[in-house]
Image (spheres, helix red, strand yellow):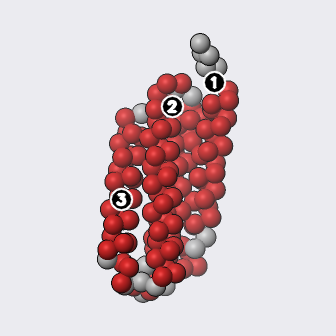
Amino acid sequence: MKKFLIMGCIFACFAVIFGAFGAHVLKAKISASNLSIYSTAVQYQFYHSLAILLSSILYYLIKARIIKIGILSFVIGIILFSGSLYLLSLREMIDFKINYIIGPLTPIGGLFFIGGWLLLIIGISKHHFNEN
């Protein structure tokens, strides 16, 4: 659980760094369209960093393996979804020619995000909480 908490903090920290970089450096270097793509990557990275942190606490409380798999889905989702959007948004700046390889990773990453949330729903639903 500790490794997931640290990972969530690292992802969140980098989301803040990447957001500041986009707002202060990239704003003048890439098109408005690509800046919007970059901003989406930052937002989803931050949302799912928080999801990793909260899910790690939930995993600590109920020890359901399905929650752990959900956390791993969020990690993979950040790497594929946000990572591919970062690369795609910077393609004009870094002369990136492999869009056909990177482009499909975005929806696959999105599926990992969705899967993570569904796994959390299942894990929470199956757990018997003390309602007192």
Residue matched to label 2: 58
**Residue name at image x 38 percent, y 79 percent:** 27
| Residue marked by disc 1 | 127
Horizontal relation, residue 129 to residue 11: left or right: right
The percent position of residue 75, horizontal first and vertical second, equals: 49, 50
User: Residue pushed farthest top?
Assistant: 132
Q: Secondary structure at mark 2?
A: helix
The quadrant of the picture occupied by the C terminus is top right
Q: Is residue 70 above or below residue 106?
A: above
Considering only order in the chain, which callout, 1 or 2, is on the residue closer to the N terminus? 2
Q: Are marks 2 and 1 in contact (CB under 8 Å)?
A: no
Quadrant for the N terminus, please: top left
User: Which badge, 1 or 3, is on the more N-terminal residue?
Assistant: 3
Q: Residues within 10 Å of mark 1 (few under 14, many from 20)?
A: few
The amino acid type of the residue labelled 1 equals His
Residue at 54% across, 24% down? 62
Side of 104 where 96 appears, left or right: left
Left or right of 43 in this view: 104: right
Q: Earlier in the sequence, mark 3 or mark 2?
A: 3
Q: Residue at x 31, y 77 (%)?
A: 25
Q: Position of residue 57 (x, y in %)?
A: 46, 32
| Cα–Cα span, label 3 and label 2 | 24 Å
Q: Which residue is mark 3?
A: 16
Instruction: Work out how far the residue at label 1 is from the one at label 3, CA to CA, in angstroms.
Output: 34 Å
Residue type at mark 2: give it: Leu
Identity of the amino acid at label 3? Val
